[in-house]
Amino acid sequence: MVEKKVLAASERLSVAQEQLDAAIQAHDANRPDIEAMKEVSERLREARLFIDKIQQHIEATAEVVPSMRGCPACGKSIRAQATLCGHCWAKVDPQRA
């Protein structure tokens, strides 16, 4: 579950990065009033840097949490958070992240 959320956030950040890069390039290519657009360009660059920092934070803090594990009673594959084995019905302690 955590892995899916991290991957989804990373994908959204990648899309935002691409959109910001495109906006920066379009702005740099078409400067009708350089003084008026200078602040906009700077804010776009700051937003891009902020997204990079968020991406680095996600990568640095994301833990790999196993989604499956073996049942201690029968050895069959069960979810890591399971409290009951679906194969042998043994009660098991859920793994904590």
Image (spheres, rainbow, N blue to C red):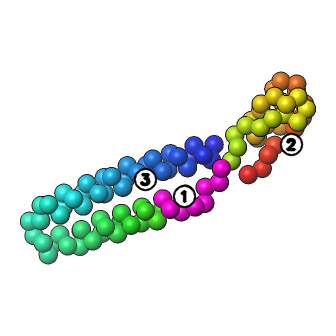
Q: CA distance from mark 1 to mark 3?
A: 10 Å
First in residue order: circle 1 vs circle 2 = 1
Provide the residue designation for mark 3: 13
What is the number of callouts on the image? 3
Dots 1, 2 in contact, CB < 8 A: no
Hey, what amino acid is under mark 2? Asp
Circle 1 residue? 58
Q: Nearer the viewer, mark 1 or mark 2?
A: 1
Q: Quadrant of residue 77?
A: top right
- Crowd class of label 2 (few under 14; some 14 to 19; many from 20; radius 10 Å): few
Which numbered dot is residue 40?
A: none
Q: Left or right of 35: which side holds 39?
A: right
Q: Is residue 24 above or below residue 35?
A: above
Q: Which residues are magenta?
A: 55-64
Above/below status of 84 relative to 7? above
Q: Amino acid at mark 3?
A: Leu
Q: In which quadrant of the rendered view does residue 4 lie?
A: top right
Mark 1 or mark 3, earlier in chain: 3
Proximity of marks 1 and 3: CB atoms separated by less than 8 Å: yes
Q: Which mark is residue 93?
A: 2
Q: Amino acid at mark 1?
A: Ile
Q: Is residue 42 left or right of residue 86?
A: left
Where in the figure is residue 87, as x and y percent of width and height? 83, 24
C-alpha distance separating marks 3 and 2: 36 Å
Report how far apart the C-alphas of labels 1 and 2 lie in the structure.
29 Å
59 part of magenta stretch: yes
Give SS at disc 1.
helix
Residue 33 % position (x, y): 10, 70
Name the element at disc 2: loop
